[in-house]
Image: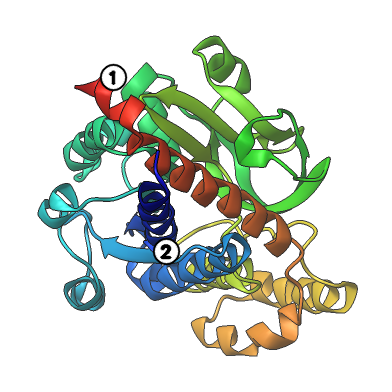
């Protein structure tokens, strides 16, 4: 190759390195969490972008069949594109969030067919896709018919998860890290491994935390929520306390594990004793404010950034490989 050709190749390589990694986010969260979820993913991807030094462009999409009130429909109309636009988009990667289940069986949810179609599309048309919480459960069931199993009570809190693989998605990660979890159901680790999934992190409390399966696209599954901001678990707990006070649930919710400091935990226990003596929706204003209850705690942020930095690096590497002459010739 001559000097001029080398110069052109170098300029082309630098230009491609500056091209943004385009990530789609299908935001399925409940109405009250739509904005916070989008913000959380923008923040963690932004931090990963700075680590990788490659620009990232996030496009937000929504599944229209997800039931929403007026507030949610308004937010989606203003902030999200439809799935037709997603299928026309040239995405490097995809993130699909979970949502609060309503039906006992996933296949009975009103959005099931739309989500199943999205799973099939992502399998054929993306380099890699991230499936979060309930979206992970739905995808595993759609692909391998592994059914989720209910916990005796909601798994809520911050848990120490141990690294269980040397996969590139967890490259450079420590031996263990903390991860927020908030869910009622679990995917059995033994069934996942038998079906060809590789578990990347786990704990005795959470089971499989992070796991992958190569399906043409690399599917990355998260039963936890590393993207959560410091106050996310508190807001969920406060929501569940409100449901108890309004008579929408019979049992008083347990507080998130390993999350509050001792003083806040004591104050919440005192509040619970009062609430159990007599429900009153107006009591909810007496719970500590989010900033008081949480303070600066964000012990899982470094791990979240590490995981998503590795994922973006995987997307960038595979995009570069897909443009190489050898790859194009092999695909033609």
Q: Position of residue 305 (x, y in %)?
A: 63, 59
Q: Is residue 260 left or right of residue 49?
A: right
Looking at the image, residue 109 lies above or below residue 241? above
* Residue at (78% x, 71% y) in the render: 269
Front position in the image: 78 or 239: 78
* Residue at (65% x, 87% y) in the render: 289
Q: Quadrant of residue 315?
A: top left
Q: Residue furthest front?
A: 2
- The answer for how far apart the CA atoms under marks 2 and 1 are is 26 Å
Report which residue position mark 2 lands on: 18
Q: Is residue 106 left or right of residue 74?
A: right
Q: Position of residue 248 (x, y in %)?
A: 43, 63
Looking at the image, residue 27 lies above or below residue 90? below
Q: Position of residue 162 (x, y in %)?
A: 78, 37
- The quarter in which the N terminus is drawn is top left
Report which residue position mark 1 lands on: 330
Front position in the image: 75 or 4: 4
Q: Quadrant of residue 79?
A: bottom left
Q: Which mark is residue 212?
A: none
Mark 2 Cα-neighbour bin, 10 Å: few <14, some 14–19, many ≥20: few
* Residue at (64% x, 56% y) in the render: 304
Front position in the image: 154 or 79: 79
Front position in the image: 103 or 293: 293
């Amino acid at each position: 190759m001559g000097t001029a050709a080398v110069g052109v190749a170098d300029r082309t390589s630098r230009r491609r390195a500056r091209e943004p990694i385009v990530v789609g986010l299908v935001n399925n969260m409940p109405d009250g969490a739509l904005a916070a979820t989008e913000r959380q993913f923008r923040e963690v991807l932004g931090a990963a972008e700075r680590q990788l030094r490659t620009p990232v462009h996030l496009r937000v999409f929504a599944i229209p069949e997800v039931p929403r009130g007026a507030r949610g429909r308004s937010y989606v109309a203003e902030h999200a594109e439809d799935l037709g636009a997603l299928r026309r988009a040239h995405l490097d990667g995809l993130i699909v969030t979970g949502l609060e289940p309503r039906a006992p069986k996933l296949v009975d949810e009103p959005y099931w067919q739309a989500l199943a179609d999205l799973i099939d599309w992502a399998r054929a048309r993306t380099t890699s896709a991230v499936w979060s919480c309930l979206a992970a459960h739905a995808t595993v069931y759609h692909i391998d018919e592994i059914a989720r199993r209910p916990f005796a009570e909601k798994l809520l809190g911050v848990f120490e998860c141990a690294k269980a693989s040397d996969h590139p998605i967890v490259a450079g990660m420590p031996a263990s890290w903390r991860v927020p979890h908030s869910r009622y159901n679990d995917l059995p680790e033994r069934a996942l491994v038998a079906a060809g999934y590789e578990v990347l992190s786990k704990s005795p409390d959470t089971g499989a935390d992070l796991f992958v399966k190569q399906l043409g696209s690399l599917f990355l599954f998260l039963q936890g929520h590393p993207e959560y901001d410091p106050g996310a678990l508190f807001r969920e707990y406060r929501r569940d306390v409100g449901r108890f006070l309004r008579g929408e649930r019979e049992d008083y919710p347990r507080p998130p594990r390993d999350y509050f400091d001792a003083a806040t935990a004591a104050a919440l226990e005192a509040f619970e004793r009062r609430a159990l003596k007599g429900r009153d929706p107006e009591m909810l204003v007496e719970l500590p404010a989010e900033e008081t209850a949480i303070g600066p705690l964000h012990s899982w942020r470094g791990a979240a950034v590490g995981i998503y930095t590795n994922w973006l690096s995987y997307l960038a590497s595979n995009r570069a490989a897909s443009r190489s002459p050898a790859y194009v010739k092999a695909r033609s």
